[in-house]
Image: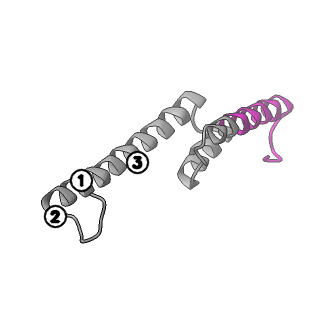
């Protein structure tokens, strides 16, 4: 916590810190470990640069992009496997 904060600012910083910790813990319980990008969004929230809603929206956007990239990867594998006969001894 920055040392130059007034008492009210310190209380707000601590409240944001607890909120960020709780939000990340809930995310982890859901099976998603926060990556560096997610942690940086919540660090910006705790420091007061962005709101909680903005941090969550950025994380959702990040996760949507990762999901889309993963789906493309999976679909690429399906297209590749559909164009080639199964390997000898495979169960396909």
Residue 22 is covered by the magenta coloring = yes
Residue denoted by label 1 = 78
Residue at 31%, 60% (x, y): give it: 91
Q: Look at the image and give the residue range highlighted in magenta.
A: 1-23
Quarter of the image with the C terminus is bottom left
Asked if disc 3 and disc 1 are in contact, CB closer than 8 Å, the reply is: no
Q: Which mark is residue 85?
A: 2
Mark in front: 2 vs 3: 2
* Label 3 Cα neighbours within 10 Å, binned few <14 / some 14-19 / many ≥20: few
CA distance separating discs 3 and 1:
18 Å
Residue 82 is covered by the magenta coloring = no
x and y, in percent, of residue 26 in the image? 67, 35
Q: Is residue 60 above or below residue 91?
A: above
Residue denoted by label 3 = 66
CA distance separating discs 2 and 1:
12 Å
CA distance separating discs 2 and 3:
30 Å
């Amino acid at each position: 916590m920055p040392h130059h904060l007034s008492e009210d600012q310190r209380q707000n910083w601590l409240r944001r810190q607890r909120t960020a910790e709780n939000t990340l813990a809930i995310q982890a319980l859901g099976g998603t470990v926060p990556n560096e990008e997610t942690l940086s969004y919540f660090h910006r929230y705790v420091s007061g640069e962005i709101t909680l809603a903005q941090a969550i929206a950025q994380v959702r956007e990040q996760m949507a992009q990762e999901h889309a990239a993963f789906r493309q990867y999976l679909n690429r594998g399906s297209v590749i496997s559909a164009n080639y006969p199964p390997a000898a001894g495979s169960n396909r």
